[in-house]
Amino acid sequence: MRNATIIVWLLLSAFLLFSACSRSPTPVTAPASEVANQTAAPEASPTPPRPSGPIEFTDVSAPAEYTSNTTAGPSGKSICRRRSVTGCAFLDFDNDGWQDILIVNSTAWPERKTPRTVLALYHNNQDGTFTDVTQQAGLAVEMYGIGVAAADYDNDGNEDIYITCVGPNHLFRNLGNGKFADVTARAGVGDPSFSTSAAWFDYDNDGRLDLFVANYVDWSVETDQLCSLDGKNKSYCTPQSYKGQSPTLYHNRGNGTFENVTSRAGLNDPTCKSLGVALLDYNGDGWLDLFVANDTEPNKLYKNNGNGTFTDEAVTAGVAFSEAGTARAGMGVDAGDYDGSGRQGIVVGNFTNESMALYSNDGSGLFTDEAPKSGIGKMSAQSLTFAVFSSITIWTACLMCLRQTATFPMTSAWSSQTSSTPSRRICFTTRARRNSKR
């Protein structure tokens, strides 16, 4: 009897254990406050980081159906204005989310019979190709163009175009239907000088873009100087042979017109021989300042005083001259936080044997040229740097004329540039300074 009782209890225990194991566990719901505080586990990045090493580029001009012939001016004449090459801009002129390309063009000397040359606007077809839409866009205008600045000056949502020229300049308003209208006369921005670069910026923080125009030297056909290296043949004169020209500042009135406020703003300086301009807020006060690169004249660092005026602080800031105390032939310039300090530095392209300048901003209003220590100085010593672009990597565009004796380091591929001077070529080189901070 006792054994039977034990067997019954064993069978009952086994049944209860089996029933408990076969039941589905009841889910436990966490309090809402705990659920809200939970953080989802990070997902793996869909694209792995780019491996370290050199960045390579491929010329896709032909497959993209992008071809542009640029004209540099007179043939066989060493004339001052022929020293300048033309610029270009990426802009989304039709607001389709794809960057289009605008190429600035110059024109041939009057006595030289060549086909008519105009600007070139290429529409991005969104498939890796471009279509020339210059004619239908209303930009088939002949001029001696040099530079371009694109921005929405009238706040209508469309990017407009300002072209700097060997006087007068041109402002093309984007009509929003794929067409542009030349509104230079009405806007009052047809600067008649030898203009090189331009920048749109809101210097008085009124919500409207104003316009700064950099001008070069006081040159014309009538004032062209005769310079010679051998006493017989005409050659290019240095900028010292000509008087400088003051930059121009146009204030946006908000009604489609501008006012020349150069003198009132304290920017009237006829000693300037400017080729490049960069925007930056070097002292972090919320007002955009200007750095102007001058050719054979001291550079300018115009501090925005916040009251509609500017003060040149280049000398005290340490960016007017080289470390040797001499003015260099400043050309291309850009500003950016290249060292990860949170402050904008400045990179300037100079003439052969002058090296580039790489100014580090210490935050107190002073700059130090780090080009020699960074290696950029040595690498760029034999380069004639016309343009620069600053990011983590500093890009430089170098120009070589085969008629001159200057040589350049073959650190990258050379590509020909079609112009009225076949001997002109452009060399693009990369210069990088890695930031060790993380």
Image (cartoon, rainbow, N blue to C red):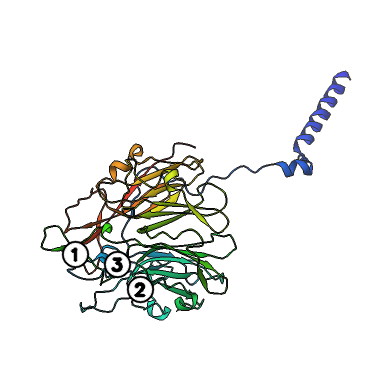
Residue at the spot of label 3: 219
Q: Could one spot residue 319 in this view of the protein?
A: yes
Residue at the spot of label 1: 226
Q: Dot 1, how many residues are within 10 Å of its Cα: few (below 14), some (14-19), or many (20+)?
A: few
Q: Which residue extends farthest top?
A: 2
The local secondary structure at tag 2 comes to loop
Please provide percent x and percent y for residue 59: 31, 60
Q: Earlier in the sequence, mark 3 or mark 2?
A: 2
Please provide percent x and percent y for residue 245: 37, 62
How many numbered circles does the render carry? 3
The local secondary structure at tag 3 comes to loop
Find the distance from the CA under tag 1 to the CA under tag 3: 12 Å
Q: Earlier in the sequence, mark 1 or mark 3?
A: 3
- The three-letter code of the residue at mark 2 reads Leu
Q: Earlier in the sequence, mark 2 or mark 1?
A: 2
Q: Could one spot residue 179 in this view of the protein?
A: no
- The three-letter code of the residue at mark 3 reads Trp
- The three-letter code of the residue at mark 1 reads Leu
Please name the residue shown 56% across and 72% down the image.
Answer: 156
Please provide percent x and percent y for residue 399: 26, 56
Residue at the spot of label 2: 119
Please provide percent x and percent y for residue 50: 42, 46
- Camera-side residue of 20 and 192: 192
Is 324 rendered above or below residue 57? above
Nearer the observer, disc 2 or disc 1? 1
- Camera-side residue of 347 and 68: 347
The local secondary structure at tag 1 comes to loop
Is 164 rendered above or below residue 306? below
Which of the image's four quarters has the N terminus?
A: top right
